[in-house]
Image (cartoon, rainbow, N blue to C red):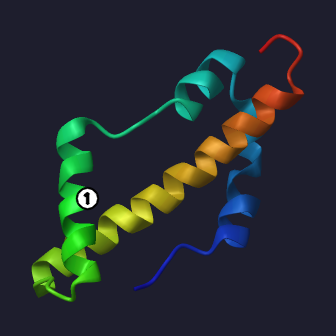
Amino acid sequence: MKTLDAPVLDRLFDPIGRILSPEVARKLADYRFDAKAQSRIDKLASKCNEGQLSDDERREYETYVQTIDFIAILQAKARSLLKRSPDA
């Protein structure tokens, strides 16, 4: 499974981290998938661990994993801003 290249994303998203307002950074840091999406991710993860994903499910699961990686990097930028910001 391919994953996103974190150093490349860091370099690309550092400017975004610098322009986030504290309010937006808090919302981004607190973002979570809704229950339906999380349930689907959990189901696919379980099937993946058991080696039972179809090709379509594997593509879907890989999309979720890459999206989670992407969001995690944005959330890290947001949390970093909140730690540095005196008005956060």
- Residue at the spot x=15%, y=75% of the render? 57
Residue 16 visible to an observer of this rendering = no
76 sits left or right of 71 in the view: right
User: Does 18 appear above or below 82?
Assistant: below
The C terminus: image quadrant = top right
49 sits left or right of 87 in the view: left
- Residue at the spot x=51%, y=61% of the render? 69
Residue type marked 1? Ile
Q: Position of residue 79 (x, y in %)?
A: 71, 36
Q: Position of residue 37 (x, y in %)?
A: 22, 47
- Residue at the spot x=70%, y=19% of the render? 22
Residue 13 visible to an observer of this rendering = yes
| Residue 83 in which image quadrant | top right
Q: Tag 1's secondary structure?
A: helix
Label total for image: 1
Q: Position of residue 14 (x, y in %)?
A: 76, 50
- Residue at the spot x=63%, y=16% of the render? 23
User: Does 80 appear above or below 3?
Assistant: above
**Residue to which mark 1 is pinned:** 41
Query: Between 24 and 34, which is closer to the camera in this rendering?
Result: 34
The N terminus: image quadrant = bottom left
Q: Position of residue 81 (x, y in %)?
A: 78, 32
5 sits left or right of 19 in the view: left
Q: Residue furthest top?
A: 87
| Residue 19 in which image quadrant | top right
Q: How many C-alpha atoms fall within 10 Å of the one at disc 1: few (<14), some, or many (≥20)?
A: some
